[in-house]
């Protein structure tokens, strides 16, 4: 384990460059689910959620990112006493960055698509988000973000989505750039 830590530190201090290079992050926050009328009432429509992501800066203004979000980290969204929704998703996103103050503060917008998995199946999801990252040094940032996920659900098995559901996700994350 200590050799892995030494290897990460070596690559962090040797190759970190805001104008390009990989990064990883882990975040924690609160998500809120909107079923678009699929469920008349939800006993609990918010949940603690976690995210893990990795990406690469193409330059200081653009990056691409792969992400995973577990919306059921705490106990999911509770429909009633017998049903709990456990949602998670994988996504691919493009981020447009606007760094200020000598690259210490970074404002960004995010858009992408992915695959959401839920209790009754899976489907396509669209991702939109905004956020701010505050860099402590050339390698570590604290990120504050808001993401919105849109996806459909075919409750009648007609072949098209008749419910346009969404999830709002507010979180903070620690990000390390290599």
Image (spheres, rainbow, N blue to C red):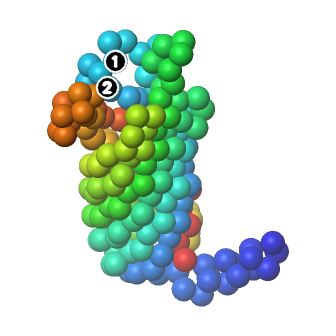
Residue 154 relative to residue 72: left or right:
left
Residue annotated with mark 2: 35
Q: Classify mark 1: helix, strand or loop.
A: loop
Q: Classify mark 2: helix, strand or loop.
A: loop
For residue 80, say whether it is visible. Answer: yes
**Quadrant of the image containing the C terminus:** bottom right
- 147 in relation to 38, above or below: below
- 178 in relation to 85, above or below: below
For residue 98, say whether it is visible. Answer: no
Q: How many marks?
A: 2
Residue annotated with mark 1: 39
Residue situated furthest bottom in the rendering: 14
Residue 152 relative to residue 170: left or right:
left
Where residue 135 is drawn, which disc sits there? none
Q: Which residue is at a point 48% across and 48% down the rendered structure image?
A: 69
In which image quadrant can residue 136 be found?
Answer: bottom right
In which image quadrant can residue 97 be found?
Answer: bottom left
Q: Residues within 10 Å of mark 1 (few under 14, many from 20)?
A: few
Q: CA distance from mark 2 to mark 1?
A: 6 Å
Horizontal and vertical percent position of residue 32: 41, 29
**Quadrant of the image containing the N terminus:** bottom right
Considering depth in this image, is 100 or 58 the residue closer to the camera? 58
Q: Which residue is at a point 51% across and 24% down the rendered structure image?
A: 84
Horizontal and vertical percent position of residue 57: 39, 74
Q: Residues within 10 Å of mark 2 (few under 14, many from 20)?
A: some
- 1 in relation to 147, above or below: below
Q: Which residue is at a point 67% across and 84% down the rendered structure image?
A: 10
Labels 2 & 1 near each other (Cβ < 8 A): yes
Q: Which residue is at a point 46% across and 44% down the rendered structure image?
A: 88
Horizontal and vertical percent position of residue 70: 51, 44
Residue situated furthest right in the rendering: 2
Horizontal and vertical percent position of residue 35: 31, 25
């Amino acid at each position: 384990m200590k050799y892995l830590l030494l290897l990460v530190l070596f690559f962090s201090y040797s190759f970190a460059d805001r104008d390009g290079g990989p990064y990883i992050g882990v975040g924690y926050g609160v998500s809120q689910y909107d079923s678009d009328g699929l469920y008349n009432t939800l006993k609990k429509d918010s949940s603690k959620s976690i995210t893990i992501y990795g990406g690469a800066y193409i330059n200081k203004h653009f990056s691409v990112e792969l992400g995973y979000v577990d919306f059921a980290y705490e106990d999911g969204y509770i429909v009633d006493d017998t049903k709990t929704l456990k949602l998670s998703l994988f996504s691919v996103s493009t981020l447009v960055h606007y760094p200020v103050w000598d690259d210490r503060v970074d404002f960004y917008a995010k858009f992408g698509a992915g695959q959401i998995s839920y209790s009754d199946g899976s489907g396509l999801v669209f991702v939109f988000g905004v956020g701010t990252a505050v860099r402590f040094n050339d390698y570590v940032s604290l990120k504050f973000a808001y993401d919105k996920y849109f996806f459909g659900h075919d409750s009648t098995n007609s072949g098209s989505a008749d419910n346009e559901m969404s999830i709002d996700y507010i979180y903070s994350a620690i990000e390390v750039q290599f």
